[in-house]
Amino acid sequence: MESDRSKAVTSYDVAKRAGVSQSAVSRCFTPGASVAKTTRAKIMKAVEDLGYRPNAIARSLITQRSNMVAVIVANMGFNPELTAQLSRSFAARGLHILLFTLDHEVEADDVVDQIWQYRVDGLVAAVRLPRRLVDAFAKRRVPTVFVNRLDDDVRANTVCCDQASGERMLVDKLIRGGARTFGVIRGPLDSAVSVRRVENAVAELRAQSITDLRFADGAFDHESGRRAFSLLMDGGGPPDAVICANDMMALGAMDAARHDHALSVPKDVSIVGFDGAPQSRWPSYDLVTVRQPTREMVEAAADMLLARIDDPTLANEKRLFSGELVLGTSARLG
Amino acid sequence: MESDRSKAVTSYDVAKRAGVSQSAVSRCFTPGASVAKTTRAKIMKAVEDLGYRPNAIARSLITQRSNMVAVIVANMGFNPELTAQLSRSFAARGLHILLFTLDHEVEADDVVDQIWQYRVDGLVAAVRLPRRLVDAFAKRRVPTVFVNRLDDDVRANTVCCDQASGERMLVDKLIRGGARTFGVIRGPLDSAVSVRRVENAVAELRAQSITDLRFADGAFDHESGRRAFSLLMDGGGPPDAVICANDMMALGAMDAARHDHALSVPKDVSIVGFDGAPQSRWPSYDLVTVRQPTREMVEAAADMLLARIDDPTLANEKRLFSGELVLGTSARLG
DNA sequence: CTGAAAGCGCTTACAG
DNA sequence: CTGAAAGCGCTTACAG
């Protein structure tokens, strides 16, 4: 146990101590490689003594495999635990995560650059990535999986949650429940997820001949949902129902209704969200929403990425998961 | 723009195209290096044409600097946005994050091994790290900063939030508010943070001659706080006040009080937490708690780590931040 | 089964 | 200012 050296121990050090060649040491750490039992024992003894661990960086250089995947998440991402889930999935597959948090202001191109320089084996991009970045990665031939990228052209691997059927069911049930006037709290304008959800909701509302419709904008967080609700209230009572582009804003809207406007939910106003965030299940809210099957989506993303890394010629694929309607008490439904 | 090649572009490719030596190319990407203006122009042209980016892995090997820091977070960590904050801090300092999520069951030693193999420049460990790991990193001489590691022996850099004064103030105010019987919802037994907070609370309670004291165990999440509250209720009414080892459990306890036991908070029972989680400020809860200055703590951690990387001989240091009492309406305070 | 040797893509003295 | 050369710590044919 004399690993306290100023320079890290290399395979040469081990070789010298074990009285073998450096290649023999290397073979001990290469799964299929052949090395005699007694030799291996000698080497492993030296490895123990010296506290040797192969240098993954050096290995990457020669194998052209870094065993690292980049994960890009947006700050205000719908699910903070998505990152944790991805981390676990990839760890189980022997891959490490190089994490990039995309601030909105930050020059996105810079991130591409960094990722590329580290020669990651692949990339998972969760939410809100400018098209420019998508193209950049495609050009670099970095195996990539997008989560909830809603473009129709499948130029990359994608795992999605179906934003349409859930949203339509929500609207349908609200109307059956008696709602005739609606408010919609949108998410950020540059969020495809928000845009799509709102489009789907509005399409269904129009299809059912609903015309009393007001809009307000939020930023996917609780606070902005709260403010947006008040905006919807401006000059009059609440609409029968408020549809929010995600759960966090819906919870903010519920808090605004109850605490800022002394309204009862769902008696005075129905409120629904989208995501299936853990907080939506807290009994103070018991939100009507659509749960995205995050775990399954993450597993699918990891599987696809791994398959793509192993065989880069694989065709692109889009895996679509359906959301699950979660009934709660935050809305009067029919 | 002919970067569509099966092999990545290297500095040799650029050199050939620009008609210069490979070392000249390298110098263009080394901050202080001297290269003639016209040469640089030629090279940069070739760089553009080929879409060349230096290989950070190869660079790491020679410079002995990976520009990566490992971040270990526990799954149930007190603050999911801690990771995001760290990511931003390090990005601003030109460092990349290799993320390790420590599942509880997972063999922690395996993580040490992985981290070591990647020859990261440093390590930030946020919450709950077994002593074995601490020692392993110390031995490897990996510059390390712990967040909220509460050991008194300073054998590593640490940034902490003072768990004592906040907890004592909380207890003191509850007693002044009239509370005489107390319940305490503990966090995981292996969490130093939980243990310390509970110790401090209990010490203050005893100092003030409070003897009616019940305990229940939770796991830092909402659901377990909710269950723990019901346990405290077993066989009788609620205590005057319930002290929770963190905010999430406190929110769960509030929900249990109101929704599972039809109690009014704070009329029937006062509830307090610790952390300053965003949700604690939601008007449904308006929790009395102690806010940890996360941003400042993360910045301090990043600063310390960087200083340590630049000069490994630096002495260990512990930076202690004080928590800020956040008054809310979830408790009757004096 | 084992060792000598080449090479992954860079950086960095060292001469010129 | 520039290029030839060594070397970072590995893996992997290739002989023996």
Image (cartoon, coloured by chain):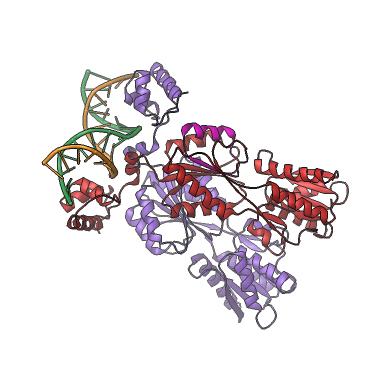
Chain colours: A purple, B red, C orange, D green
User: In this picture, is B61 found above or below A242?
Assistant: above
- Tell me, yes or no, if residue B68 can be seen here: yes
Image check: D12 left or right of B330?
Answer: left
Query: Where residue A211 sits: x, y (%)?
Result: 60, 82
User: In this picture, is A233 found above or below A298?
Assistant: below
Image check: A219 left or right of B258?
Answer: left
Query: Where residue B69 sits: x, y (%)?
Result: 46, 44
Task: Give the residue at x 27% y 53%.
Answer: B52
Task: Find the residue positioned furthest to the right.
Answer: B236
In magenta segment, residue A18:
no
Task: Give the residue at x 34% y 24%.
Answer: A24
Query: Where residue B177 sits: x, y (%)?
Result: 82, 57
User: In this picture, is A134 found above or below A298?
Assistant: below
Q: Looking at the rendering, which quadrant does residue A155 occupy? A: bottom left
Residue nearer the viewer, B265 or B136: B136
Tag count: 0
Task: Give the residue at x 18% y 57%.
Answer: B42
The C terminus of chain A lies in quadrant: bottom right
Task: Find the residue positioned furthest to the bottom.
Answer: A235
Residue nearer the viewer, A324 or B155: B155
- Tell me, yes or no, if residue A154 can be seen here: no
Task: Give the residue at x 82% y 48%.
Answer: B182
In magenta segment, residue B143:
yes
Residue nearer the viewer, B325 or B27: B325
The segment highlighted magenta reads B129-151
Query: Where residue B230 sits: x, y (%)?
Result: 80, 49
